[in-house]
Image (cartoon, rainbow, N blue to C red):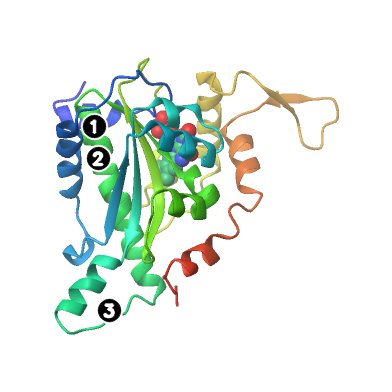
């Protein structure tokens, strides 16, 4: 416990992947979205939109898109955070201009805006006893998301989020030591010690269920499977390689 209820809330975060079926009243959704909208937004442009999905059939379709993650069907609410250029296309039209949204910069601005509103919503939801889990896996098939949610050209899904009442309190995953991520004055590339310490800490949580892997270069020897092995496996293969084409098809040129 700290002296700050906000800090306590932030430190109590853990992704929730099992939910009670209780629906969320629209007024509650509006409350957390209003808090989401308080997030900073580049030049107050607010180039994002949020699609709220409560309909069970649509949640089932989203679950399939997200690789069968059961939480997507189970959670009573699914939010899809989108980069949205269409509103400012309209603003420009109404004022006699033409929006130039052709650069990577403009897409990044919209994507960052979408991420910031999402995280504010996450904290607002958690402050009211709800649980959340981001669902990046909607990017497995953005074309299917676009069709399902009827996203017009100029609107692209960045990430999803499940929201609902947690079935169990979430597990708190340790984070990297600050030596690895906070660099005072200039970048410090010497992170091996911090990484090894974190790997050990993650192994001790039991998250990896005490899996073992062979020690590189030492035949017959085994070592614990930890965060480093888990993460290295995940990042050593390319993922979602058609994304640039999908983003371009949806009206973002990324020049
Ligand atoms: C953009 C983004 C996408 C994510 N996508 C998924 C997902 O598709 N499925 C899932 O179970 N968790 C997903 N997560 C949750 C992360 O796995 C989780 O935040 C991370 O493992 C740290 O755990 P914690 O949130 O419990 O602290 C995602 C998180 C982020 C930020």
Question: CB of mark 2 within 8 Å of CB of mark 1?
Answer: yes
Closer-to-camera residue (140/219): 140
Which residue sits at x=38%, y=57%?
151
Badge 3 density bin: few <14, some 14–19, many ≥20, Cα 10 Å: some
Quadrant of the rendering where the C terminus is positioned: bottom left
The answer to which quarter of the image holds residue 17 is top left
Asked if 22 appears above or below 65 in the picture, the reply is: above
Q: CA distance from mark 1 to mark 3?
A: 34 Å
The quadrant holding residue 97 is bottom left
* Residue matched to label 1: 125
Residue 176 lies, with reference to residue 8, above or below; the image says below
Mark 2 or mark 3, which is nearer to you? 3
The numbered mark, 2 or 3, whose residue comes first in the sequence reads 3
**Where residue 124 appears, x then y in whole percent?**
20, 35
**Residue denoted by label 3:** 99
Query: Ligand 1, what quadrant?
Result: top left
Q: Relative to the observer, which residue lies in front, 245 or 229? A: 245
x and y, in percent, of residue 189 in the image: 50, 53
Residue 56 sits above or below residue 82 on the image: above
Looking at the image, which residue sits at the far top? 168
Which residue corresponds to the image point at 37% horizontal and 48% vertical from the top-left? 182
Q: Secondary structure at mark 1?
A: helix
Q: Nearer the viewer, residue 152 or 164?
A: 152
Residue drawn at x 54%, y 50% as measured from the top left? 141
The percent position of residue 44, horizontal first and vertical second, equals: 17, 63
Q: Secondary structure at mark 3?
A: loop
**What's the distance in space between the residues labelled 2 and 3, CA to CA?**
28 Å
Left or right side of 164 for 210:
right
Residue bearing mark 2: 121
Residue 36 position in % (x across, y down): 20, 45
């Amino acid at each position: 416990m700290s002296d700050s209820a906000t800090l306590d809330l932030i430190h109590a975060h853990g992704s929730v992947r099992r939910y009670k079926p209780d629906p969320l009243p629209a007024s509650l959704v509006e409350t957390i979205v209003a808090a989401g909208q308080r997030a900073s937004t580049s030049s107050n442009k607010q180039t994002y939109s949020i699609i709220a999905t409560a309909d069970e059939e649509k949640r089932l379709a989203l679950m399939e898109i997200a690789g069968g993650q059961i939480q997507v069907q189970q959670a009573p609410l699914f939010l899809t955070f989108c980069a949205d250029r269409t509103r400012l296309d309209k603003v420009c039209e109404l004022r006699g201009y033409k929006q130039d949204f052709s650069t990577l910069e403009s897409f990044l601005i919209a994507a960052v805006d979408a991420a910031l509103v999402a995280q504010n919503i996450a904290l607002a939801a958690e402050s009211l006893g709800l649980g959340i889990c981001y669902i990046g896996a909607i990017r497995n098939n953005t074309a299917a998301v676009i069709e399902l949610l009827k996203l017009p050209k100029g609107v692209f899904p960045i990430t999803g989020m499940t929201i609902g009442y947690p079935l169990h309190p979430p597990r708190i995953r340790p984070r990297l030591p600050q030596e690895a991520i906070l660099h005072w004055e200039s970048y410090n590339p010497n992170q091996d010690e911090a990484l090894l310490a974190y790997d050990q800490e993650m192994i001790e949580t039991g998250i990896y269920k005490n899996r073992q892997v062979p020690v590189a270069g030492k035949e017959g020897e085994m070592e614990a499977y930890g965060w480093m092995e888990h993460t290295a496996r995940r990042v050593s293969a390319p993922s979602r390689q058609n994304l640039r084409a999908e983003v371009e098809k949806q009206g973002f040129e990324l020049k």
